[in-house]
């Protein structure tokens, strides 16, 4: 019983075997990430099967804009996770409690800003993207509802990040599974039974995320042996706020870069028509699951390195990197084999439109090897972030997304124009993504070997 209980509390990753630490932390985190991915996936499956490809495209085309609106929380979450893991590893109780309280207050402020500003920019952005008429209305409805209900999603992501920084990856998993089941039930009720479309899945998602956020906050406030949240700790501390922004801003900017690039590429995707939009959305849903192990190992490496840097255990950091990288690559190879073998079955979960299925399988085959490259990128980027170097991953993302992917996508589309394909080949969307992933892995490996993360790890907090 004690062996099980320890995984439901804060885990000290500065002791024990590094690989055991990483696996014990990663397994529930991976399951949780997969469950979180189920939110959007279930939405897509239900609207695709019960409403049609236009509704499927509406939910999917909203993604880049929603991610853009969430970048404030992504930055806060990254900064909070790094500070919490380092303070926890260093046993600095006061700073730990202050950093958690500050992040909770910053999240509330950011949520209110998004709830006010979001609805004002949604329609102009959808118009700017030249969204097809049969998709436009449902996409706007979806984004309006999710934006107004953003606080639940914000607090789940922030507080689950804090819990992971403390080494507790199990509690967020349990709460997320509860919310995921609720989301599925509500999707069926609103869409299948009540006849709603994209607005139904948006409402289901908002309610489910609010439940998961409430459960995470309950868990955090009951970890009395680790930290105590008092009224005075909720008053933002200037120094902690500055550190959170310093560590989180590069990550937030990275997500902004991804979101802006996705919006620009979405405009190119929209030019190919509803079938290609629907295909792209389904491929990205499958991609979301395929990427989860890579993101999981990256997050695990951030917490592991953060705690050991705080404890001054650089010897454990080096061993953890080797073992974590090997595990990440092994999982990526297995996933690639699964995609190549079962790609068509995955596509048919979302739609029975033969044109969409065939094109989707082709696109998955293009992307497959890129997941191995992303295993390298995510693991080593996680190491850098855990050591406090959040700038280097930002610059790598800037180079691979803005300098490599976007020009390549539009360039290939332009060069492949023909009478049959007046806007170019849809392959340009995914070949450009594959090239950016591979180049990102090469650049990240070079920066890990010669970068500044080691010097930052040796510096005091």
Image: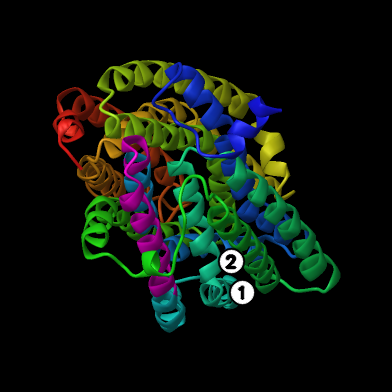
Image point (75%, 74%), residue name? 196
Q: Mark 1 points at which residue?
A: 138
416 in relation to 230, above or below:
above
Label 1 crowd bin: few (<14), some (14–19), many (20+), radius 10 Å: many
4 in relation to 247, above or below:
above
Do labels 1 and 2 touch, CB within 8 Å?
A: yes
Between 67 and 154, the one nearer to me in the picture:
154
Q: Can residue 389 be found in the magenta stretch? A: no
| Residue 311 spot, x, y in % from top left | 30, 30
Between 120 and 421, the one nearer to me in the picture:
120
- From where the camera sits, is residue 106 visible? no
Q: Name the residue under label 2.
A: 58
Q: Answer with left or right where residue 49 lies relative to residue 141.
A: right
| Residue 212 spot, x, y in % from top left | 63, 58
SS for dot 1: helix
| Residue 228 spot, x, y in % from top left | 47, 55
Label 1 and label 2: CA atoms lie apart by: 6 Å
**Quadrant where the image shows the N terminus:** top right
Between 61 and 310, the one nearer to me in the picture:
310
**Quadrant where the image shows the C terminus:** top left
Magenta stretch, residue numbers: 87-111
| Residue 385 quadrant | top left
SS for dot 2: helix
Q: Answer with left or right where residue 448 lies relative to residue 76.
A: left
Label 2 crowd bin: few (<14), some (14–19), many (20+), radius 10 Å: many
């Amino acid at each position: 019983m004690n062996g099980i209980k320890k995984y439901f509390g804060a885990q000290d990753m500065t002791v024990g075997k590094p690989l055991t630490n990483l696996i014990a932390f990663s397994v529930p985190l991976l399951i949780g990430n997969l469950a979180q991915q189920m939110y959007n996936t279930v939405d897509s499956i239900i609207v695709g099967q019960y409403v049609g490809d236009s509704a499927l495209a509406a939910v999917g085309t909203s993604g880049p804009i929603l991610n853009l609106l969430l970048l404030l929380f992504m930055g806060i979450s990254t900064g909070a996770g790094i500070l919490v893991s380092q303070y926890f590893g260093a046993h600095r109780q006061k700073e730990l409690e202050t950093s958690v309280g500050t992040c909770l207050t910053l999240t509330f402020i950011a949520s209110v800003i998004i709830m006010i500003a979001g609805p004002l920019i949604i329609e102009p952005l959808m118009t700017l993207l030249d969204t097809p008429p049969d998709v436009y209305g449902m996409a706007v409805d979806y984004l309006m509802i999710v934006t107004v209900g953003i606080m639940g999603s914000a607090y789940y992501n922030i507080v689950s990040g804090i819990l992971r920084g403390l080494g507790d990856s199990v509690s967020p998993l349990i709460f997320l599974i509860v919310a995921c089941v609720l989301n599925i039930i509500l999707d069926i009720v609103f869409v299948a039974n009540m006849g709603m479309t994209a607005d139904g899945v948006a409402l289901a998602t908002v309610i489910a995320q609010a439940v998961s956020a409430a459960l995470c906050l309950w868990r955090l406030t009951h970890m009395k042996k680790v930290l105590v949240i008092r009224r005075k700790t909720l008053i933002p501390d200037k120094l902690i706020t500055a550190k959170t922004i310093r560590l989180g801003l590069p990550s937030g900017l990275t997500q902004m870069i991804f979101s802006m690039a996705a919006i620009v590429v979405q405009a190119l995707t929209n030019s190919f028509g509803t079938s290609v939009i629907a295909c792209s959305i389904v491929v990205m849903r499958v991609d979301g699951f395929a990427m989860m192990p890579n993101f999981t190992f990256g997050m695990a490496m951030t917490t592991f390195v953060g705690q050991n840097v705080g404890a001054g255990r650089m010897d454990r950091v080096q061993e953890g990197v080797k073992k974590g990288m090997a595990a990440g690559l092994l999982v990526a190879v297995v996933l690639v084999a699964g995609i190549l073998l079962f790609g068509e079955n995955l596509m048919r979960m979302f739609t029975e439109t033969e044109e969409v299925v065939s094109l989707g399988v082709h696109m998955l085959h293009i992307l497959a090897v890129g997941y191995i490259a992303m295993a390298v990128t995510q693991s080593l980027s996680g190491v850098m972030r855990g050591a406090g170097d959040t700038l280097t991953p930002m610059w790598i993302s800037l180079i691979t997304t803005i300098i490599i992917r976007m020009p390549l996508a539009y360039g290939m589309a332009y060069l492949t124009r023909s009478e049959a394909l007046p806007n170019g080949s849809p392959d340009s969307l995914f070949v450009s993504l594959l090239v950016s992933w591979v180049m990102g892995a090469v650049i990240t490996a070079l920066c890990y070997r010669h970068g500044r993360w080691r010097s930052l790890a040796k510096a005091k907090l």
